Image: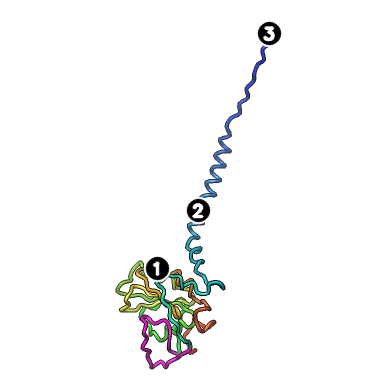
């Protein structure tokens, strides 16, 4: 009598539920990482321009930056004017009273001698040609200044470029408000203690100093 061995094949169902769940988790994690990378990109890019002990003046690497050495604390009387050789000026003799620079957007042009004194305190001054910068471009500049300490902004009629940025001894001129060098300039130079004379000076109000 011939005996036959029955072969029992055990088949298990494919765990589609587990696979789908794992794929969903991986996809979600990838989406979160991608979102973070996209959202944090501007901050990470800006951080590269922050001053450090090894790189005290990162602005020197910004294309188009112009620098000039100026002696600080050279004051004039409110009735006097300075024949600046730069437009807008970004250093040199200035009024004994500074322009408030605690995140102020001035609606009209301000006397340069007062603005230069604020630069001596570590501020960044954004100027723009009102005939060339309006609407959305103007709003983008305002957002970089409003409520941000040691920044100020004002129109500068007749400016040879649409936008010009000043800090003590530094200037950068650009053609539009989307230029990434604007943020690089601000990050590198606003209250950068390596680049301006009166470290720790106030920017909150007008005053002699």
Q: Earlier in the sequence, mark 1 or mark 3?
A: 3
Callout 1: SS = helix
Task: Say which residue appears at 51% left-offset and 66% top-offset.
Answer: 48
Structural distance between the alpha carbons of marks 1 and 3? 92 Å
Region in magenta: 73-95
Structural distance between the alpha carbons of marks 1 and 2? 26 Å
Task: State the image quarter where residue 24 is shown.
Answer: top right
Residue at image mark 3 = 2
CB under 8 Å between discs 1 and 3: no
Structural distance between the alpha carbons of marks 2 and 3? 67 Å
* Residue 147 at x, y percent in the picture: 47, 73
* Residue 120 at x, y percent in the picture: 47, 83
Disc 2 or disc 3, which is closer to the eye?
A: 3
Callout 2: SS = helix
Residue at image mark 2 = 34
Callout 3: SS = loop
Task: Say which residue appears at 31% left-offset and 72% top-offset.
Answer: 132
CB under 8 Å between discs 1 and 2: no
Task: Say which residue appears at 57% left-offset and 32% top-offset.
Answer: 14
* Residue 145 at x, y percent in the picture: 44, 73
Residue 158 vs residue 53: left or right? left
Mark 1 crowd level (few <14, some 14–19, many ≥20, 10 Å Cα): some
Residue at image mark 1 = 140
Checking the image for residue 58, the label placed there is: none
Mark 2 crowd level (few <14, some 14–19, many ≥20, 10 Å Cα): few
């Amino acid at each position: 009598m011939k005996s036959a061995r029955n072969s029992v094949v055990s088949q298990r169902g494919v765990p589609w539920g587990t696979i789908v769940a794992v794929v969903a988790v991986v996809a979600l994690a990838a989406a979160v990482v991608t979102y973070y990378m996209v959202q944090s990109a501007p901050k990470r890019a800006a951080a590269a321009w922050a001053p450090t002990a090894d790189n005290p003046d990162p602005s020197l690497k910004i294309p188009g930056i112009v620098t000039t050495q100026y002696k600080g604390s050279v004051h004039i009387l409110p009735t006097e004017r300075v024949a600046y050789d730069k437009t807008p000026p970004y250093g040199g003799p200035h009024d004994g009273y500074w322009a408030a620079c605690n995140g102020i957007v001035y609606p009209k042009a301000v006397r340069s001698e007062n603005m230069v004194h604020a630069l001596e305190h570590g501020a960044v001054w954004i100027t723009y040609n009102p005939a060339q910068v309006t609407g959305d471009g103007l709003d983008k500049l305002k957002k970089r200044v409003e409520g941000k300490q040691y920044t100020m902004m004002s129109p500068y009629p007749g400016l040879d470029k649409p936008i010009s940025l000043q800090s003590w001894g530094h200037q950068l001129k650009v053609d539009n408000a989307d230029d990434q060098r604007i943020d690089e300039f601000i990050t590198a130079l606003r209250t950068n203690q390596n680049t301006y004379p009166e470290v720790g000076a106030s920017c909150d109000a007008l005053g002699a100093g």
